[in-house]
Image (cartoon, helix red, strand yellow):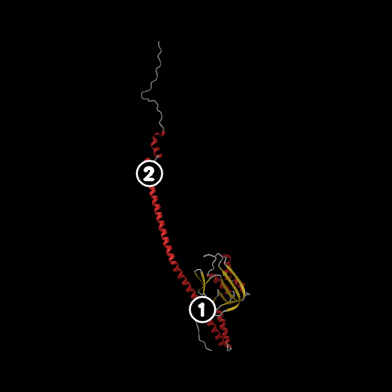
Amino acid sequence: MTQQAPEQPTQPPNQRAPQQPRRVDASMSLLNNLMAHPLDEGYAVAARTRSTQGDRPLRSRHRVMLVAATVVLGFLLAVAAAQNYRSAPEAEKQRNELVDRINQADSRLTGLRNNQSNLADEVRRLQASGLSNDSTGAALQQKLDDLELQTGAIAVTGPGLKAVIDDAKNADAKEGRLLDVDLQQLVNGLWTSGAEAISVNGHRITSLTAIRGAGSAITVDYSSLTPPYTVLAIGDTATMPARFAQSSGGQWVQYLVSNFDVRSTITTEDSLLVPADATIALRYAKVGTR
């Protein structure tokens, strides 16, 4: 009896042999290619060709425009310089003429004031000689002398204080420069300290005198002054220094010295000369009976 070999199992007809699994990214190759190369190579080559060919003319045009603008600017500057050079002598001539006219006017004004002062002295001499004949005239002359002293019509000599005040050493337009109000405070402080007569840089201070600012300058009786400012005050030297230091004017000056480096020196003098007010004039008169 023969033994039969066992039958080999057969696969069902509808079952297929297992296949190799596909790569996960095989179906994403198109997207990966788009992400890696967003621009088509043909466009990239065209763009590179256009940039290398188009930048050169553009840069050349920019250079030409820059050179042209430089040439035009240089021409305009040359024209302006030439015009200034031609007009400089004429402007300098006009300036010198104006300075000469100002100096002539100042000299004429000084001469007129000196003449006025001489005539005023002559009037006083004649007046004194006419009033010295009797006691009534002498009393009237004394009254006139007192009034002229108060109004600044006559010069005054005697002891007093000499104050020299100046801007700070490194003063600029905002700080360290003296103003008209500073000079006003100084003068008012001397008045309250007992001064009988005051002058600033040779100008007598009276009840009609104006101390004002004109731009960067200080004017007294409309005459511009330049620092340092010398203030003379005739009065009692035994009491004036202490009274001035306690006055508002003295404290104001000390404030300027301490906070703005303003320079100030105040000394007592045995003899000072305060001139008369050259601008004073008789404004009202009344006929009296004797």
Q: Which mark is residue 111?
A: 1
Q: Position of residue 193 (x, y in %)?
A: 59, 74
Relative depth, front residue between 284 and 59: 59
Judge the density around disc 2: few (<14), some (14-19), many (≥20) Cα neighbours within 10 Å: few
54 above or below 207?
above
172 above or below 43?
below
Confirm or deny contact between disc 1 and disc 2 (CB under 8 A): no
Residue at 48% from the left image edge and 73% from the top image edge: 100
Q: Hey, what amino acid is under mark 2? A: Thr
Residue at 53% from the left image edge and 81% from the top image edge: 118
Relative depth, front residue between 242 and 29: 29
Name the secondary structure under disc 2: helix
Q: Position of residue 215 (x, y in %)?
A: 49, 69
Count of numbered circles in the view: 2
Most extreme residue toward the right is 238
- Would you say 95 lies left or right of 245 here? left
